Amino acid sequence: MVKIEIPPEHPRAESLRIREKLVENFETGAVAIAGLIAHGRGEAFDYLIGEKTTEPALKAIRAAAAALLTAKNPVISVNGNTAALSAKEIVDLAKIVNAKVEVNLFYRSCERELAIKKLLEDAGAEEILGVGEDASARIPELGSERRRVDPRGILIADVVLVPLEDGDRTEALVKMGKKVIAVDLNPLSRTAQTASITIVDNVVRAMPMLVKTASELKGESLENLQEILSNYNNKEVLAESVNLILQRLSEIAKTGKYIELGGGGDGI
Ligand code: PTJ
C-alpha cells in the first residue's frame, strides 16, 4: 500500500489522517474491509451535522456518562473501527466508570480479535474480554457473529456502550433489558433509532468528550446522576439532531456555500 505524506496545511488534513489510521489498521488486520466503507458513510453524515459535536450530541454524552456511572456492570464493546480510532479513550473511559472492555465483531476472525486486543493493550488495557474461547455465551435471536459474547461481560451487562454498531445487536441487547449507548453519525440508522441513548457524533470527537464528561460527573451523587437520566429522552434528542441537519441544509441551500463549523478549521 502506498504511504502518503499528509501536508499539514491541507484544508482536510485531519480527515485524511483519520482515513490513514483506518487504512493502516486495515493492513494490520484490526479493521474489516467493510469498516472502510462504513467510515465513508459516517463522513457523509459528518458533513451534514457540520463536523462538530452538536448540542444534542452533548446532551446524549451527558446521559451516557450518567448511565455508565450508575451501572452495576457496564461494558464497552469494541469493534475494528473503534479500536483503530479511539483505543486510548476506550481504556481511559473504562477506568473512570469501572467498565469491562470486550471485543465484539461483526466480521469475526481470530486474527482480527488478536489485532484489536493488541491495539487495546498498547493503549494500556489490562483485561480484554470476548477473545477466542472467552466469547462462549450467545445473545438469543441474533444470527450474526456479534451473537458471541463473553459470559463475564456483555451477557451480564446492564449498560453496554456500542460505538459504530449494526442495528441487529442493538435491538437484541435492548430486548434483553440492557441499556444500550450508541455512537453513530447517522441519526437514521437502525442502531441510532433503537439504542437507549444515541450520540450522533464522530467517535473521534465523542469518545474524548465522553471521557471528560464522565470524569466531571464522577463526583456527583447517585440522585443527581439518576435525575440526568430521567430527564433524558432519546427520541427528542434524535429529532433535534435531524432538525439541526434540516436547518443547516436550508441555510446552505440559500447560498449554495458549505458552512464550515468544524473545530480548528480543518474539518474531520
Ligand atoms: O469490526 P467489525 O467486524 O465489528 O465491523 C464494524 C463495521 C463498522 C464494519 C460494522 O459494524 C458495520 O457494518 O457497521 P454498519 O452497519 O456499516 O454501521 C456503521 C455505522 O457507523 C454507520 O451508520 C455509519 O454512519 C457510522 N459511522 C461510521 N464511521 C463513524 C460512524 N459513526 C461515528 N463515528 C465514525 N467515525
Image (spheres, helix red, strand yellow):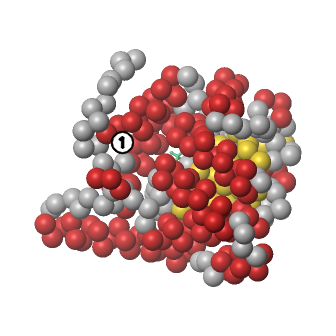
Q: Quadrant of residue 245?
A: bottom left
Q: Which residue is mark 1?
A: 14
- For image coordinates 71% across by 66% down, the residue present is 218
Which residue is rendered at x = 54% and y = 72% of the image?
59
Asked if residue 21 shows in the view, the reply is: yes
Direction from residue 172 to residue 82 in the image, left or right: left
Q: Secondary structure at mark 1?
A: helix
Residue at image point 63% right, 66% down: 216
Looking at this view, is 9 or 174 the one in front? 9
Number of marks in picture: 1
For residue 148, side relative to residue 58 (left or right): right
* Kind of residue at disc 1: Glu
Q: Residues within 10 Å of mark 1 (few under 14, many from 20)?
A: some
- The residue positioned 73% from the left and 42% from the top of the image is 102
**On screen, 175 above or below 119?**
below
Give the percent coordinates (x, y) of residue 121.
Answer: 69, 32
- In terms of depth relative to the viewer, which is nearer, 210 or 104? 210
User: Which residue in the rendered view is the most extreme toward the left?
Assistant: 255
Q: How far from the left and from the top, in percent, is residue 74?
A: 76, 56
Residue closest to the far top: 1
39 w.r.t. 53: above or below = above
Q: Position of residue 248 (x, y in %)?
A: 29, 68
Q: Is residue 134 left or right of residue 159?
A: right
